[in-house]
Amino acid sequence: MSVSEMRELPPAELRAAIRAGEYTGPTGGLARRRVQANLVILPEEYAFDFLKFCVRNPKPCPVLEVTDAGSPEPAALAPGADLRTDVPRYRVYEDGRLAGEPVEITAYWRRDLVAFLLGCSFTFETALLAAGLRLAHVEQGRNVPMYVTNRECVPSGPFSGPMVVSMRPYRADEIPRVVSITGRYPAMHGAPVHVGDPAGLGIGDLSRPDFGEPVELEEGQIPVFWACGVTPQVAIRNAGVPLVITHSPGHMFITDRLNPEYEI
Amino acid sequence: MSVSEMRELPPAELRAAIRAGEYTGPTGGLARRRVQANLVILPEEYAFDFLKFCVRNPKPCPVLEVTDAGSPEPAALAPGADLRTDVPRYRVYEDGRLAGEPVEITAYWRRDLVAFLLGCSFTFETALLAAGLRLAHVEQGRNVPMYVTNRECVPSGPFSGPMVVSMRPYRADEIPRVVSITGRYPAMHGAPVHVGDPAGLGIGDLSRPDFGEPVELEEGQIPVFWACGVTPQVAIRNAGVPLVITHSPGHMFITDRLNPEYEI
């Protein structure tokens, strides 16, 4: 199925097409009105410390839902969905090593696994576009650039690490609107954590992001930094969890919830 | 020490006076600019399910901080404080029965205990007063009336039960301001869950609250209901946790954080 055919489907039909293997691509641009979520699946043994890590670091790790151990159904965000099959592509990490990038994870499922759905910047990006603000990385056909900062997250049990930020450039006169629009979505990373001065976050060279791809800044644009959902992935890697399953970057879980339900 | 002497102390000195046993009364009106918090202490075995319960029911159970197991220090909200001594009065429940209401809990402390600090309505009540809005229960010298509703919380493990609400009466023309002012504090129960029509929440008789004391409604006043921090206490009672320690009603933990830090 093509992206343009997919784009107009209601979320349950989108997930059904993904479940049937008819779509395995990135979800950016699909179901623009719906909340898309980062997925992290861990053994229950690690679930309390990880949830505590998220609560202690809500800007990079905003929790939207936590499933019951063994249940693959996100009953609050998408009743009837199945987190084992309804994400277009997963990443499976065994003992910290990428063991595969499958399109479903039924074979890996266990009764002690707990799934976490975390807010994702697509919601505020949609709001920025709706307000006539630009997204440089989208215009330039790149993944958003992400940088490891010198700010440490508050640790929890084995989970620790630096905050990772994403960067989007804006003009000085746009920044007040950019801050207030994204600040309306605290469950999707919210307002920026830093405006300008990459060195203040310990970022030496904007043209060399740690994740994603660099974007060109136009004359007069200032880099604006948001807490990023890659932060918990770095913390999980540091924790040495024997089995972790996440979505593959850009291949998010599409929920039933409308973006404005999370607007404040 | 008298309440009027206490009122002006900085939070660390207030806590020191409480720790020294110089003050064992309720904390309403003390440190008006500071966030006060509900306290729940549970064995680690129950901590994940309880934290999941809070995340699933954020209006009644807004989590401000979770301590590491065995640590009585709320490092984020009040570094250097001690949750075993710095609350004026506690309630200790053993196997669901009230075992005592001590002024410190050092003897009960164990290495597997986890403390949760949850947002409290004092923050939004201060904001209502600052905006010239009245608090009927304060004017009438009563505890705020609280009611068990017909709305079930989303359960988590052994934790389940109805949402409990507090009620404050306002005139029709005040309600828009009341909603928007309290809505600025989502970490302190936020906007009301219900305006008017007690029957819609399953409340039969406003003059017979399940907790607290009834307040008189003036001609033209409408009851306004907020999700209430007694909700998690009911859920904990339902869960059959062998040891639970909470603050005694009205005897909250006073943090270092300023109310506006939580304003959105």
Image (cartoon, coloured by chain):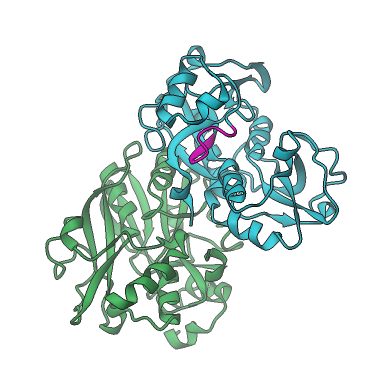
Chain colours: A cyan, B green
Q: Nearer the viewer, residue B216 or B83?
A: B216
Name the side, left or right, on which A70 lies relative to A243.
Answer: left
Residue lying farthest to the left in this orientation: B204
Residue A141 horizontal side relative to residue B250, left or right: right
Instruction: Identify whether A76 is placed above or below B145.
Output: above
Q: Position of residue B202 (x, y in %)?
A: 16, 55
Please determine whether, in this image, residue A178 is positioned above or below residue B25: above
Instruction: Choose between A6 and A177: the one closer to the eye.
Output: A6
Figure quadrant of the N terminus of chain B: bottom left
A31 vs A78, left or right, is: right
Task: Find the residue positioned furthest to the top.
Answer: A107
Q: Does any portion of residue A159 appear in the rendered image?
A: no
Q: Main secondary structure of the magenta part?
A: loop
Residue at image point 45% right, 70% down: B123
Query: What's the residue at 75%, 34% (across, down)?
Result: A211
Residue at 34% of width from left, 52% of height from top? B232
Span colored in magenta: A28-37
Decide which of B104, B57 is in the foreground and name it. Answer: B57
How many circles with numbers are drawn on the protein? 0
Q: Position of residue B172 (x, y in %)?
A: 27, 75
Q: Position of residue A34 (x, y in %)?
A: 48, 39
Magenta span contains residue A32: yes
Q: Residue B256 in magenta? A: no
Q: Quadrant of residue A250?
A: top right
**Residue B22 can be seen in this image:** yes
In the rendered image, residue B69, in percent from the top left (x then y), is placed at 52, 45
Residue at screen point 22% across, 55% down:
B149
